[in-house]
Image: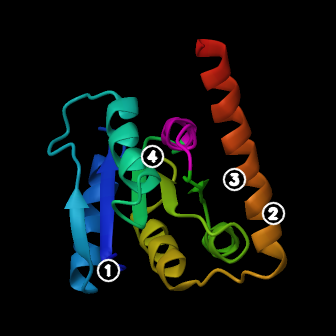
Amino acid sequence: MNEKMIALASDHGGYALKEAIRGLLLNEGYQVEDLGPHGTESVDYPDYGARLAALVSQGEVLWGILACGTGIGMSIVANKFPNVRGALCHDLYTATMSRQHNDANILILGGRVLEEKVALEIVRTWLITPFEGDRHNRRLAKIKALEENLFSLRESRRS
């Protein structure tokens, strides 16, 4: 899998930030799959968040970055998908911890609550921070078990 490929999406509230992030990523040698939107018209964040989260969930891309007005809506959507560990980050510390301790695979940002300069520093930090593993693997395994149990429960209710 291409570790230099990053999926990117937003809604209208995060559009300007998405465009700034896209520029940063391209300048730093990443390949970007821009899932939209491609303008500032009002759109529904669940459509764009779900499209990106599905790619990460299914292993089609390793990393994703989402932006909406506050980041809250995209966080809710992204974390509905199995294998997604979406982290809403507001500063360098939360970006670092989301990678070191949680192995976050989707970074979520609020376009209306972060200055662009800060947001781009968060992106840089998130991209270069490695997962520490060790004791955190045990915790991620528990999250994975929760996902599997919830999926099994849903499937058994459908039968």
Q: In this picture, is 108 found above or below 3?
A: above
Q: In this picture, is 9 found above or below 159?
A: below
- Image quarter where the N terminus lies is bottom left
Mark 2 or mark 3: whose residue is earlier in sequence: 2
Q: Say left or right for 134 vs 10.
A: right
Mark 3 or mark 4: whose residue is earlier in sequence: 4
Residue carrying label 1: 4
Instruction: Give the residue type that dot 3 points to.
Output: Lys
- Give the mark toward the camera: 2 or 4: 2
Q: How many neighbours does mark 3 have within 10 angstroms: few (below 14), some (14-19), or many (20 or more)?
A: some
Residue carrying label 4: 112
Residue 4 is situated, as x and y percent measured from the top left of the image, at 32, 80
Mark 1 or mark 3: whose residue is earlier in sequence: 1
Q: In this picture, is 145 found above or below 41?
A: below
Instruction: Give the residue type that dot 1 points to.
Output: Lys
- Residue farthest along the front direction in this orientation: 159
Residue carrying label 3: 144
Residue 81 is situated, as x and y percent measured from the top left of the image, at 52, 42
Q: Give the Cα distance between marks 1 and 3.
A: 25 Å
- Residue 148 in sight in this render: yes
- Give the mark toward the camera: 2 or 1: 2
State the residue in front, 84 or 22.
84
Q: Give the Cα distance between marks 2 and 1.
A: 27 Å
Which residue is pictured at 15% across the width and 42% down the height?
39
- Give the mark toward the camera: 1 or 3: 3
